[in-house]
Amino acid sequence: MKRIEKIKILILDDEKQFTEELSGFFNDSEYESFEANTAAEGLKILSSKTIDLLILDVRLPGVNGLDILKDVKLQYPAMEVIIISAHGDMDTVIKAMRLGAFDYLRKPFRFIDIQIAIERTQKYLHMQRKLKQMEERNSLISKTLEQKIDRQFIGVSPAILEVFELAVTAANYPDANVLITGESGTGKENIARIIHYSSSRKDHIFCAVNSSAITDSLLESEFFGHKKGSFTGAINDKMGFFEVCNQGTLFLDEIADMPFNLQAKILRATEEKVITRVGDTNDIQTDFRIVSATNHDIYKRIHDNKFRLDLLHRLNTLHIHIPALRERPEDIRPLLDHFVEKYSSRFNKPNLHVTKEVYDVLYKYEFPGNVRELKNMAERAIILCKGNSLGLADFRVKSDTTKEVHASDEIVDLKKQEIKMVRKALQKCGYNQKEAADILGITRDALIRKMKKYSIVVSKGED
C-alpha cells in the first residue's frame, strides 16, 4: 500500500519543557513534530518545511502571537493553527478565530485535548479520508491490480464479462457519467468502484450516497453543503457531496428514488460543475464524475412524472446493465467457490467441500436476491456446518423454489415468481420483514421496495 505521509506539526512556545513534552507525545503518535521557542526559530522552520499544523502560544518574547497568526495565515492559508495560552480571555479567543485559528486551548491541557483538536482539523480529516480510500481500494482490487479486476468481480459468463469490458471502457473516459441498472443484489456498486479505481480519478474520493435515504430537510445541505448559521443547527461550515468528491467520483445509488424537487438542482450541478452552499452567495467550482445506479424501470418513473428525462440524459452518457444471476447460471459455481473460500478462511473452517447436489440445486434456483443472496447463503452455511462438507442441509433452498431448465419449458413469469418468493419468505418467518429479507438475501429496504412495487399486502391471518 502506498505510504500516507505523516501530518507535520510545529510547536511554537517559549517554554522549552512544554515543547519537548508535546513533541515527544506527537512523535510517539502518527505525527511528525518540530519545536521552536522563539518567533524567529518558528518562522525559519515554516520557510524550510511544509507544515500542516501550527500550535502557537499567544504570548511570546517580544511579539504578540496573534500578529504571528495573522502573518502565517496570509503566507500559508492552507495551514491549520491552534492557539494556546495560560492567560486566555474571551477577547483573545474571538480575535484568534477571526484571524483564522482553527481552535483555542487553555493551558494546562491534557494530551487527549490536543489530540481531539487535531482530529477536528481539515488536514487530519483529509489524511484519514486518503488512508480510508487507499485501504478500501486495496480491499476491493485483487492481486491482479494491473488488470483492474475487483475481488468481488467473479464470473465466466459472456454476459458478465461484457459488463466488465464496459466498466473498463467507462474507466478510460473519466468525465463521462455512467448509469448502472440491474436488480437488487447484482453488484452495481461493485461495478461503480471498478470504474472509479480503474480511472484517472482513482487517487481521489469515491463517495457512495443512497439517494432515497436522505430526508427532505437535509437534501440541499447534504449535496451542496451549507454556511454556518444558514439554518438552525448549522453550527459550522459544511462541505456537501459535490465538494467532497472534487476530482473524484460521486456514486448515487437508488437514483430513481431521488426526490423530484432535488433533481433540477442536481441537473444544474452536473452540467455546470458549479455549486453554491446553502446560505451562501459564492459559487464553488468542482470537478466530479457521477456514476448512478437503479433497480427500477427508470423510463416508467419518467412516464409517471417521478424522474426528469433531461436528468436521465445527463446521467446516461454510458449505460451498463448487469444481468440477474438467474440469467447467467454458469457464474453460480465460481461465485459460490469464491464465497466459500472467503468465509471458511474468516471463520477458521479450512478445507470445506461443497457437494455436487448443492451445485445442482442452486443451478435451478431463481435467486431473487441475486449475488448478494448467494453470498449470504454461503456465509450462513459455513457458520452452521458441522463437518468438512457443505451439503443441501446447510443451504436453505427448498425444492418448490427451484425449477428444471429445459429448452421446451414455458417462459416463467418472473414477476409472479418474485411475488411468490416474497410472500413465502414473509409467511415463513411470521411476517417479520427483517427475517424475511435475510431469507431472501436482500436488505429490509429492498424487501419493502419490492412489496410496494408489486403491491404486496400481507396480513398475519394469511396461510
Image (cartoon, rainbow, N blue to C red):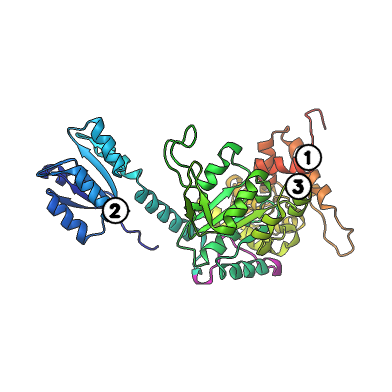
The three-letter amino acid code for the residue at tag 2 is: Asp
Residue interval drawn in magenta: 146-160
Residue 371 horizontal/vertical position (percent):
66, 55
Q: Which residue is mark 2?
A: 52
Give the numbered dot on residue 423: 1
Horizontal side, residue 396 vs residue 287: left or right:
right
Q: Which residue is mark 3?
A: 305
- The answer to whether any part of residue 173 appears in the image is yes
Q: Determine crowd level at label 2: few under 14, some 14-19, many 20+ residues with C-alpha closer than 10 A.
A: many
**Which tag is nearer the camera, tag 2 or tag 3?**
3
The three-letter amino acid code for the residue at tag 1 is: Arg
Residue 79 horizontal/vertical position (percent):
30, 52
- Between 267 and 250, the residue placed more toward the observer is 267
Q: Earlier in the sequence, mark 2 or mark 3?
A: 2
Horizontal side, residue 147 vs residue 309: left or right:
left
- Rounded to the nearest whole Å, what is the CA distance between mark 2 and mark 3? 50 Å
Question: In the rendered structure, does residue 30 fall within the stretch colored magenta?
Answer: no
Residue 260 horizontal/vertical position (percent):
67, 45
State the image quarter where residue 408 is shown.
bottom right
- The answer to whether any part of residue 26 appears in the image is no
Residue at 83% x, 47% y: name it. Answer: 416
Instruction: Name the outermost residue toward the front.
Output: 281
